[in-house]
Image (cartoon, grey):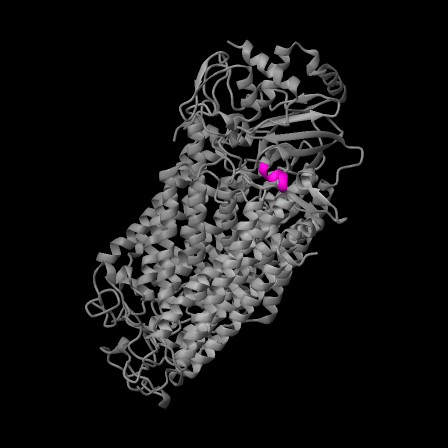
Amino acid sequence: MSSTTADAHAGGHGHGHDHPKHLAHHFETLEQQYGSGKLGIWTFLLTEVLFFSALFVAYTMYRAQYPEVFQFASQYLDTNLGAINTIVLLFSSLTVAWGVRNAMLGQHKMLCINLLLTLACAGGFMGIKYVEYSHKFHEGTLWGGHVDSIFKADPADISETMKEHSHAWNGDGELVAVKDLDPVFRQRLGLFFAVYFCLTGLHGIHVLIGMILLTWLLLRAMKKEFGPDHFGAIDFGGLYWHLVDLIWIFLFPLLYLIS
Amino acid sequence: MTPSTNTLERTNYLNATKGFMSWFWTIDHKRLGLMYMWSVVAAFILGGFFALKIRMTLMPGAVDFASQTAEQMNAYNNAFTVHGAVMIFLVIIPSIPAALGNFVVPMMLGAKDVAFPRLNRFSYHLWIIGALLFTGTFFIGNLDTGWTFYPPYSTGSTDNTVILATLGAFVLGFSSIFTGLNFIVTIHKMRPANMTWFRMPLFLWAIYATAVIQILATPVIGISLLLLLVEKTMSIGIFNPELGGDPVFFQHLFWFYSHPAVYIMILPGMGVMSELFATFSRKPIFGYKSIAMSSLAIALFSFIVWGHHMFLSGQSQLMSVIFSALTFSVAVPSAIKVFNWIATMYKGSVAFTTPMIYGMSIIWLFGIGGLTGLFLATLGTDVQFHDTYFVVAHFHYVMVGSALFGFIGGIYYWWPKMYGRMADNFWTKLAWFMSFIGFNLTFLPQFVGGSRGMPRRYAGYGTEAGYDSFNYWSTIGAMILAVGLTMALGTLIYSMFRGRKAPSNPWGGVTLEWQTPTPPPEHNFEIDAFPVGDPYDMNLCEYNGEEEGFLPVNPRADDPCVADVAIDPVYFEPESENAPA
Amino acid sequence: MNLSALLRAAAWLQQDGDYFFPVEASTNAGEVDRIYYFIFWVSAVSFALIVGATIYFAIKYRRTKVGMNPEDSPHHSTSIEIVWSVIPTLFMIVMFKWGFDDYVDRRTPPGDAYQVNVHAQKWSWAYSYDEGAETGMGWLGGEGEGLVVPVGVPIKLRIDSADVLHSFSVPAFRIKMDAVPGRYTYAWFEATKIGEYPVFCTEYCGTRHSRMLSKVQVLSQEDFDAWMKKQGNLADLPPVEAGQKLFQRKCASCHNMDGSKLIGPALNGLYGKEESLVGGAKVTVDDNYLRESILEPSAKIVEGYPDAMTPFAGQLSEDEISWLITYIKSVK
């Protein structure tokens, strides 16, 4: 077998001289470095999708088993707030994508503005989420294991204050007291909210991580660290943010728009 | 006499910088590999201690069955839980990929480092945090759930150690994900231009297949453990039958990861085997493509067989039948690999070095481990063997007999490259012999005990149950195994200080890591370009008596491996594009 | 190593059954063993070939001097690789099919099977019959009746669990099935030999998992009928005796009556005593305390004991609770 060489690959670069400023020591070229980062972030996003997958499987499994429970439960979710949040996140995807473009073109000021806008959207999303959560904790529309939950199999376990004002519309459009529902049905409502809080909670954690990431990028952008030959971090952070948005795009119809 | 290609007296990656922080905060993949290796060894000693504790409790006559107290039983339950969790999460999963993989992969690629060195360091620090969380359970209670953490037991009345342990496993999961991600990108992006996929050494194929499993399966265990944590701390109810949840659902999620995890453990061992059989037969590996493809096939099949852990869990009959059929499918590529290794020896020049002896014994041990898997894949017989010592023996033949022996064989193989010294020939072989005998004596009786119904995770068996003889031989075997493994460790530590200085290529390997001085310089290679053809073209190097090792046949003028060796000008024919930059 | 150890080590050779299996005591056992021996011999021959080839090649082609080069040989051979992929596949298809048939058979009880309900909880087995009889754990050669069944009749087991996962295993019948809280699982067998066979819990369930033992008593049909006739109702017994039977069945795996600690405290001489609770409070043992401790054990935990008991709320009738209290009162 004839031996060939990897010389072409080694390029013209020797040992440190003509090494571009942003090129890490172990890479040969900027293209290789950028390509590695890109593959790395996509692989990471794949693991993120799989991270959520178990919850989506839980959702699918329990919804297939108890479709009427899920339909009933969705009346507790505020479709308007969910829709506003969807729009907020979609807009933030636009600004972050625009920011990547700014970084590529070296538009430092626009980059900062776009990152700031994205951060503001993320904050707005979390604010609306907070409103939704606190409402649910107030009403006791929680998973069955929570002490204040109104979805316990045994009505004796539901606190008196919660019992009085918890009513819901049944399938025939009649207002019924939650405490009078079939115990098994009520218990499964608790299961729906277990899935709801796990999915939206985990997504919320990802939004928070995204906000930390965006803040870090913003601080670096303010120091004008990014430019046409060095926009990888913005690009990869943006991809992460798109994924966070994408998961919400799935969550919104799955949870809020069941009926 | 010191071989000319040994750099112990010169600057190398071991002595280039000094001090604790130069190791702890390093981003050098070789140093990280070594630190992983020693950390794994330390964790192994901890897990081994608990293994001995298990065997001592089960030795007939050691503990009276009738008067065994609840405290003694709890201690036993803790012992098998910690043994399992430590050995799986802290030892076998990171052993070959994180320790040997980190050390070898970039050098095999002719690269200076992995694609993301800082992420690599972060993985290692996550490993340490995970290990500390596990160790923390000793101080706050008695972890006794079994390494499988099945609810509702784990979320019910057991103490808060479960929180620390699942948190630990969660962190270790991310350590494993980042290692896998790093290797995938490294192998994709850092290969020399003319090292095509089918010119990669098979160890790289194995690591690549492993990394695919790591990034696809590990997130699922991550979220499952997170859900278990939420269940434990906030009673969320997804796995709790009292709140309408399904405990069997956790088993599905758990085994969706944990079955592929078995291949995270065994595939890298198979990669080491391929290197050993090629180098020590001085022949190209037989059936290169089918070995490479079988690694990928195993990785893919591993995702669709998890249900065979649950034939008796109450899952539907149909699922059990499908999973049984799929499970057999994973046996075929494993068998192909074994046949290929054996065929590699045919008409070879087989050297009985210590790594090769590990390699050959793995064929037998993996043979037993794999063939006994057939009994467990078959629905009819699995009912009898499920959750008995038959299963325990089966997976120890795979985890220890194949993965751990592969790890040790791999350490001996790359040891000269790591520390620039050779381990002693006689004592390493004696250590192997003791381990081999001890291992078989420990686990062969367990097959028979298991087929006679002996249940696992029992703190004791009355004499009436009739399992005393199996326990007796197992305990004797475990003690011999412990002596053998301790000796193996001793030979390594001794050779670090007193071993004969190693040439750059003591075995005649032709993959790229053998083409740099021993121990390698900080950035792996002193020259940029490397010949890359058939990864197993053994004609690329030949034995040199003065060197007591192998030297390149067609060296380049600037190759530091041969700087001090007189070069016959006939062999020195640099191709034009080979010229130094 | 001494002589007694050696004798003990060889003891299993003289036990019932053959080298690998306990005695075949159900209609299904023979089939499982036949599948086992088929796979065993296929594996044994394959293993012998693998080991033989490794040793033969290693010796024949060993490196006799340093630097020796190999002979020429092919690097791959499509035909031989196909052969060694296809042959194992064919054998595996046979294994799968055979195991599948047996499994489907085992999962499908005959329509006329006699049902017994198996109740698992930490750490005891209880069995209840539609005729009203109830039995407790039992162990080889010990007290307690265990699962009593007639020979030659298909028995369908409906298994449930009150707390965590358990698994019901009878090696002599080659059956095993998990007990899952919140649902029923099923297994069936038809015993072929009169005798006593061990039952194990084979899914880890906590401290006394290794003591969650029981036995199956296989009786002739006449003996079984006679036994069933004797069972009568607990309600026909004096409350103390009814309580004692119930105690043996439900409580004895964790509570002694001889003053020694098991998992929970011993219960003899308990009535009227003052107990210190976790958290410092004290309580005098009376009927209400006993009742609460049975139904909601976590409400008051005695100092020095774990919060490990499964609540019996919903499992016991008012009469049964009252019998238990009467019995506990009676033991000084």
The answer to whether residue B405 is seen in the rendering is yes
x and y percentages locating residue A140 in the rendered image: 58, 44
Q: Which residue lies most toward the right here?
A: C112
B410 sits to left or right of C77: left
Q: Which residue lies most toward the bottom here?
A: B576
In this picture, is A135 found above or below B287? above
* Quadrant for the C terminus of chain A in the image: bottom right
Q: Which is more toward the observer, B120 or A202?
A: A202
Q: Quadrant of residue B536?
A: bottom left
x and y percentages locating residue B337 in the rendered image: 53, 62
Tell me the magenta residue range.
Answer: A161-165
What type of secondary structure mainly makes up the magenta span? helix
B442 sits to left or right of C168: left
x and y percentages locating residue A249 in the rendered image: 59, 64
In this picture, is C56 found above or below A238? above
Q: Residue at x 39, y 46 (%)?
A: B134
